[in-house]
Every structure is written in structure tokens, then in C-alpha cells.
Amino acid sequence: MVFTQFLMFFLLRNASWPTLLLAAYFFGGVINHALMLAIHEIAHNQAFGHGVFLPNRLFGIFANLPVGLPASISFRKYHLEHHRYQGVPSKDADLPTELEAKLFCYTGTKLLWIILQPFFYALRPVLVYPKPVTGLEVVNFLIQLAFDALVYKFCGGRVLFYMIGGSLMAMGLHPVAGHFVSEHYMFKKGYETYSYYGCLNWVTFNVGYHMEHHDFPGVPGSKLPLVEEDSGGVLRRPPPAQLVGPGAVRLHHGPRHRAVRPHQAEGSRQARRQRGVPVFRRRRQHRSNRREALCLRPREARLRPRVSGVVFFVFSLPFVKDGIYAKLAE
């Protein structure tokens, strides 16, 4: 696919703008989207194996070249967190922010949200869950910048637009980009991950088999169709997302239709208890007592609402002249 795009760069040097736009949307965008999903496979070390780090990263940078935007190394850094903390705010960068949910809640704004999906997909991790820049990210950026400069010098700005514009269009309102919505948006209550088994899996490294991918992230995309067959029906899956898969996005499902696990967020009381970290009292107290861990027994936890209810009842008596309190006084 990389060399196919190199050939297209040469053929489209003198193409007209209408031809360039059509080629970028219907051909170059599909190829670049497939390359981004190849980067997804490489992020899981599927190219050279799980025990080989540097060759996988360098191959991902090579596959990144026709995309036009440096994404390979940064994508892996955040995507592995998506698998580990799916649905956890401030950890899962794939989870839309509360601002997105408030702004894009109508049909027209949801359509705009889908068109702008590549920008949210790129900027959300940096804003929600920023991480230090690594050396490989700098290498990825410099190599991509040098490649884009060479394309501009030898092929012109139109080919550079074909390269970058095709990538952006193929991540927005495009049939192959439908998996961004169909993968984790809740179309059936109780299920937060869905699979798509249509023909677009042929050009997307079987990314439609997304529930299988999350169950077995170490299995390459080419083997995901065999996962359910080999499991003997053990996997419990929702109905296939044939109507919500790539190319058939349902606009009445917006950014709010995602399963969220706020109790598993880093620093939450329940998460700290699960890791064995003491949970301290929140109210102000003497410094010497702050180190005492809060460990309520079930009976003590049940008594707290009763005590607060009695206090509220007593303090509300002077402000009630009629009603049940007056009858009790009689």
C-alpha cells in the first residue's frame, strides 16, 4: 500500500483539482485509512512479533509516510491505554469529553462531530491525558516532516493535499471510518463493544471484529475471524453491528452513548481500595490523624444515613408549622 501511494503521487502530479479531490476521497483516503489500521496492527507488535520492539516501531514509521501526519508512535502510546482503561475518564483517550457530549447533541452537530472526527481523535489525547514526548515520537515527527517536504518539492502542493487531505477525509464522513462509531457506542444496553462482519473488513485488517480484538488483543487481525470458531461458542457477543458498522452511521447516537467507568479512574477511592492503597478521610482533621485509613464496616456505613436523617428532622421542626410535625405535636 505504501508503494501504491508512491505511484499515485507520481501519476497525480499534474491532475486537476476535481480529479484530485475524487482520487483523494475514493482511493487515496481508503489506502491511507488502511495504512492507519496497519499502524494499529503494528502498535500491537503484529509485524515482527511481541518480543521485537524497535523493528515494529520503525516499520510503523515507514507505514506512516503516505498518511502525511506523524501518528504511529503517539497512537501506540495512547491506544494501549485504551485497551487497559477502556471507558475510564482521563485514561481512555478514545472516550469523548463532556464538552463534546454537550456541544454535539443534535443531528446537525453530530454530523459536524463526525466530519471533525480526525481532529478530535488527534487532539483529545493531548488535552485529556497528556504524556511526556518520547524520543521515538521526535524521530517519527522529523522523518514525516522530511518526507512531506520531499513530496512538496518533487510532486507539488496538490499531491501533498492528496496525501494529507485524503487521510483527513477518510477519518471523517467516509464509509471506512464508520468503525469509529460502531466499535464502542452503545447501540444495545449492556454491551459496550461491537463487531462488524461486512466486506469492509477486507481493506481494514478485520478491525470490524472489535469485540474479538479486545478479548484477544495479541491475535493478529487476519486470525480474528477464527477466534469465535475456535472458542466453541464460549464468547458471548451482542448481535452483529451490521446496521451500525462502517458506512451506516446512526446519527441519533451521539458522544454520550458510551459506557463510562468513573470508579476505575486513577485516584478514585474504589480503585485505590482495589490496589490495596489506604483511603483517607476527606474532612479536615488534625494532621496526626490524617494518616488513619478509613475502613467502614457495613453496619457503620448503614448508620451514617440514619444519623443524618435524624439531624435533618430535628433541625427542620422549628420551620414547619403545619403537616406531620404539627400532628405529632398534638
Image (cartoon, rainbow, N blue to C red):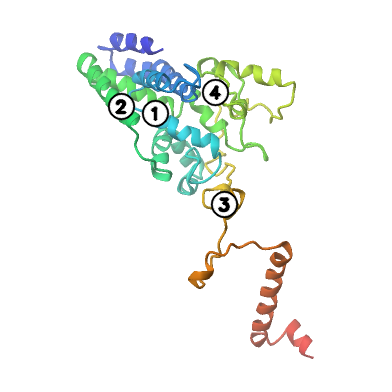
Of residues 68 and 140, the one drawn nearer to the viewer in this rendering: 140
Q: Position of residue 90 (x, y in %)?
A: 48, 46
Q: Earlier in the sequence, mark 2 or mark 3?
A: 2
Q: Position of residue 74 (x, y in %)?
A: 39, 32
Quadrant of the image for the N terminus? Answer: top left
**Measured along the vertical axis of the image, is residue 329 above or below residue 250?**
below
Q: Disc 1 or 2, which lies upstream in sequence? A: 1
Q: Cα distance, mark 4 to mark 1? A: 19 Å
Percent coordinates x, y for residue 224 in the rendering: 61, 19
Of all residues, the one furthest to the left in this rendering is 153
Q: Secondary structure at mark 2?
A: helix
Residue at 52%, 67% (x, y): give it: 290
Q: Earlier in the sequence, mark 4 or mark 2?
A: 2
Mark 1: amino acid: Ile
Q: Do labels 1 and 2 touch, CB within 8 Å?
A: yes
Q: Are marks 4 and 2 in contact (CB under 8 Å)?
A: no
Q: What residue sits right under mark 1 in the picture?
A: 73
- Label located before the other in sequence (3 or 1): 1
Residue pushed farthest bottom? 330
Amino acid at pointer 4: Val
Q: CA distance from mark 1 to mark 2?
A: 9 Å
What residue type is disc 2 on?
Val
Q: Are marks 2 and 3 in contact (CB under 8 Å)?
A: no
Q: How far across and how far down the image is residue 110, in percent?
A: 49, 39
What residue is disc 4 on? Answer: 207
- Tag on residue 272? 3
Question: The residue under label 3 is which amino acid type?
Answer: Arg
